[in-house]
Amino acid sequence: MKKFMVGMAVAAALALGAHVAAQRSPVTLNVYSEGDVNVQDLWQKSLIPMYQKANPNVRLNLVFSSHGAGNQSTLDRMAAAQKAGKVSGVDLLEGPVDDAGAAGLMDKLDAKKVPNLTRTDPKVVQRVQGYGVPYRGSSVVLAYDSTKVKNPPRTLPALLDWINKNPGQFTYNTPDTGGSGNAFVTRLLRTGISAKDSDLFETDYDPAMEKQWDKGFATLKALAPKLYGGGQYSKNNVETLQLLGKGAITMGPVWSDMGLSYLKQGLLPDTIKLTQIDPPLYGGASYVGVAKDSPNKAAAYAFLNWLLTPGVQAVVVDRMNGYPGVKLQYMGKDVQAKFGDIAGDFSFGFSSKFGADMNRLWYERVAGTPQPQQR
Amino acid sequence: MSRAVRVPPASDGEASHRRREALWGLLFVLPPLAVLVTLVVLPALDAVRFSLGLVPADNVSYTSGLNLVRSDVPTLQVFRDLFANPVFGRNLSLTLFVTFASMLLLAVLSYALALYGRFGVGRLRSIARTLALLPMFVPGVIAAYALITFYGDNGLFEAMLGRVGLPYETVVRRDWGVVLGSVWTGVPFAVLMLSSGLDAVSEEQIEAARDAGAGFWTVLWRVVLPLNLVPLLIVLTFTFIGVFGSFTVPYLLGPTSPQMLGVSMQLYFGSFRQPQVAVAMAVFSFVVCAFAGALYVLATTRQQGRRA
C-alpha cells in the first residue's frame, strides 16, 4: 500500500511537472489563413506582432494561402492526418471552417472555450455551425464616379431611380460569379420577403417560400434594359471594378475591401468613391476556427478570445475597412460612429440552398429572356 | 482507316505462336483498358443511371443536389422536365446555331487557307501556313481573352475603325462572339487535317485534269474536293463535337443568357446545385455527339468501300 502511495505521488509529481513545463515552454500556433494581400498584411503587420508582444510564450506561424488557392490542400492534409491518426500541424484555420467542420476536422467552439464569443451575433456564429469565431466582416458597397455623381443614392429606391435615369451607367456581376452582384440581387429579392421570414431565408431551405422573390425578380427584369450595354452583366467582382476604372460605367456594387485595395494600388482612379445604401447590401464574416487535432487547444482558445477584444477589433476594422466581428455595442465610440446605423443591421445573404435557387431563377427570369436589341 | 489485312491460313506451329503473340497483345492492351473502364466507362454509366432517377447513395455531390428525381426504376422524368424547360430550349438552339455556324465558317475558311498553302506560290504562302497553325499553341483561355481585348468594347478593333469613322458594335458577349472564338481556335486543326489531305492529291492528277482543259474551279470541284472528302468529314464532325460541348470559349465570349450547353451544365452542377439536370444534359450531349460520330463513321466506311 505504501509503495502504491509513493508511486501515485511520484506519478502526480511527474504529471504536474510535465504540466508546468508545458506552460513554460513556448507554444507555436500554426495559423492557416487565406485572402488577398490586405488580409496577409493584417496578420503579418498587425495581429501577430501585437499578440506576440503581449504573449512572448506563444509563437504564431502564419501559413498564408493567397485567395484561398491552397484551401483544398489544407483540408486534404487535415483529413489525411486524421485518417492516419496523426497531427496535421494545423492549429488555427481561417477560411472554409464550416466545410472542414462538416468533415469532422474542426473543434466546435462555445462561450466556455472562448468567453468573448458571447459578444458576437449568435446568428453569425450559427452560419458556420459554431466551427469558427467571426473576427471581421466585409461588406458590399456602392462604388461611383464622384466627378459624375455629386449626390450618390443613399437608399435602394434612390439607387433604382438613379439607374433608370442614367441608362447604361450601372451594372452588376451575375449572382453566381461573385458576392458583389450577388448582394445586389439578394437586396432586391429581400424587398418582397416578409420580416418574419427573413431569418428563415438565411438559415433554412423551403422552395415553396421562393414566391416571395417574385417582386424582386420583376424589379430586376425591368431594370435590365437600363444596365450597361442595354442589359450586360459583368462576369465577376473584378470586372465591375474594371468597368468602373475604364469609365464604361459610373456606378456599381463592389466589395468594400476589394474596392479599397484597388484604390490603394491605383487600379481605380481616386475619383471613385465608396458608399453604402440603407438598408445595406450584405456582408459576410471571416471566421477562424481551431483544428480538432490541434495539440495546443488552450493556447488557440486564448488567442481567439484575444482576437475578439475591442482593442484588437478596432485594429481589424481600421486596417480592413470592414465591420467588426463583435456586435457594435462592444466597440469604442469612434467605431460606433464610423458605421452608424449600417452595421446595426448586419445584412446576410441567403442560405446556400436558397442561394443556389436564387442563381438559377435569376438566369431563368432575369437574364433568361431575350434582352431588347440595341439600336 | 486501315483496310483489313487478309491473313493466309496458318500451319499448326504458326498457330500456337500466333496465339502467344495475341496473348501478349492482350496483356499490353489491358492497362489502358482498365484506366478507360474505371475513369470513363464506369462514371459514365453512373451518370446515365443518375439521369434516369437512380440516385447512388455513396456519391455526395449527387445526393446533396436540389430538386432530385428519385425513383427505384429507371424513369425519363428528368429528361421530360429538361425538355419542358423553355430555358433549355433556348440554350439548345443557341448551341446548335453556334455549332453549325462555326462548322460552316471554319470549313470554308480552313479550306481556303489549306488550298492556298497547297497551291499558292511565293514566301507569303509559307507565312500563311505557319500563321494558320499559330492558334494551336495559344491556350483557349488566353485566346478568348485576347479576342475580348481586340474585338470587345473599347478594344483595339473599335479604335482602328473609329480612326476611319466606321461605326462598330462588338460581337463579344453575343452569339457571334462564340462563333468567332470557336473558329479562331478551330483553324489549326482543320487546316492541318485538310492540308494533309491536299498534300496527298498528286500533282499528276491535277496536271492531267489541266491538260484536259479544266480550269481552276473545275479542278477544285471535280478532282480536289472528291479526293479530299474524308479529311473534310473529319473536320466537320470534330468541329461539331468540339463546339457542341465546348466550355471555355462560350463562357468567356458568350452572352449571359441564353448559354451554350457546356456553360449551362457547369452552372447547373455548381451554382444551381442541380447535378441531376447537369448530368442529364451531359447524357443528352453525349447522345447527340455519338450520333454525329456515327454519321461520320458511316460516311467514311462508304467512301472506303467505294474506293476498294
Image (cartoon, rainbow, N blue to C red):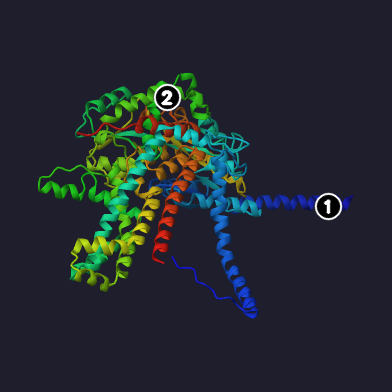
Q: Which amino acid does label 1 sit on?
A: Val
Report if residue B143 is visible in the image: yes
**What residue is shown with label 1?**
A6
Q: Position of residue A306 (x, y in %)?
A: 51, 40
Above or below, A90 against A187 in this view is below
Q: Give coordinates of residue B197: x percent, y percent.
A: 33, 66
Asked if labels 1 and 2 share a chain, the reply is yes
Label 1 and label 2: CA atoms lie apart by: 74 Å
- What SS does tag 2 mark? helix
Q: Earlier in the sequence, mark 1 or mark 2?
A: 1
The residue lying toward the viewer, choosing from A59 and B145, is B145
Query: What subunit carries mark 1?
Result: A
- Badge 1: how crowded within 10 Å, few (<14), some, or many (20+)? few
Q: Residue at x 29, y 55 (%)?
A: B107
Q: Which residue is drawn at 38% across and 26% down?
A: A217
Horizontal relation, residue A213 to residue B68: left or right: left
Q: Determine whether the residue tagged by mark 1 lies in a helix, strand or loop.
A: helix
Q: Residue furthest front?
A: B212
Query: Pointer 2: what residue?
Result: A213
| Rendered location of residue B234, percent (x, y) | 37, 58
